[in-house]
Amino acid sequence: MKVFLIGFMGSGKTTIGKKLANYLKYEFIDLDKFIEARAGMTIVDYFAAHGEEEFRKMERDVLQTTHYPDNVIIATGGGTPTYDDNMEWMNENGKVAYLSLPPKALASRLEHSTTDRPLIRGLKGEALVDFIAAKLKEREPFYNQSKCVISASDLTAERLAFYLNLSYSG
Ligand SMILES: Nc1ncnc2c1ncn2[C@@H]1O[C@H](COP(=O)(O)OP(=O)(O)OP(=O)(O)O)[C@@H](O)[C@H]1O
Ligand SMILES: O=C(O)C1=C[C@@H](O)[C@@H](O)[C@H](O)C1
Ligand SMILES: [Mg+2]
């Protein structure tokens, strides 16, 4: 079983993904970390050196060619579902959960960690909220292709497992 967690930066894919993996006794993979390992540099440096289009090509390649363990939770990047056939590929290869949160809540989670996220670097306050609102509008048609849309506020691993119809099988 593969579970792909999708959603905007700050929706908590990495945070809840680790908890869900721990709860179900699954492996946990953070796609951003795999990309950094493949690139041999941080995502910030990769964006600066090669630009977003090259990043998206590599992200697609890492997503679709990684050899995943049998039972695994995969925290994707915020933009992963929006490129090429990634959303279709995830729907065909596992369960996909969209962790949904409104722009203001996302902004307050991200306010103090914008430097390691190239798309929102340097943004704060109203400018950050406005950027998130516009980007989210662009991305939601992709995110909503998930069969499982879940509010990410106060989400627990137990509830996420329940929504995904998964339980610890020993
Ligand atoms: N349930 C939660 N309640 C409050 N804050 C949270 C919650 N989940 C995550 N956060 C905080 O929000 C920030 C972003 O979380 P996280 O890195 O898990 O998001 P992400 O979806 O993986 O983002 P990215 O797409 O950039 O990798 C972190 O500072 C984290 O501590
Ligand atoms: O939302 C996005 O486009 C991104 C989110 C992060 O997870 C990283 O994948 C990268 O910073 C791009
Ligand atoms: Mg993450």
Image (cartoon, helix red, strand yellow):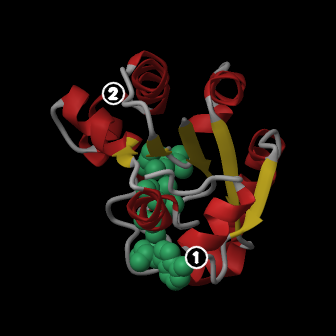
Residue 91, position as x, y percentages in the image: 71, 29
In the image, residue 168 above or below residue 144: below
Does residue 78 appear to the left or right of 112 in the view shown?
A: right
The amino acid type found where label 1 is placed reads Thr
* Nearer to me, 24 or 148: 24
Q: Secondary structure at mark 1?
A: loop
Q: Are marks 1 and 2 in contact (CB under 8 Å)?
A: no
Name the quarter where the N terminus is drawn: top right
Task: Determine whether the beta carbon of the residue marked 2 sits less than 8 angstroms from the nearest atom of ligand 2.
Answer: no
Residue 50 is marked as 2
Q: Position of residue 11 (x, y in %)?
A: 58, 66
Q: Nearer the viewer, residue 10 or 95?
A: 95
- For disc 1, the marked residue is 156
x 40%, y 49%: residue: 26
Q: Residue at x 49, y 19 (%)?
A: 64
**Pointer 1 or 2: first along the chain:** 2
Q: Quadrant of residue 7?
A: bottom right
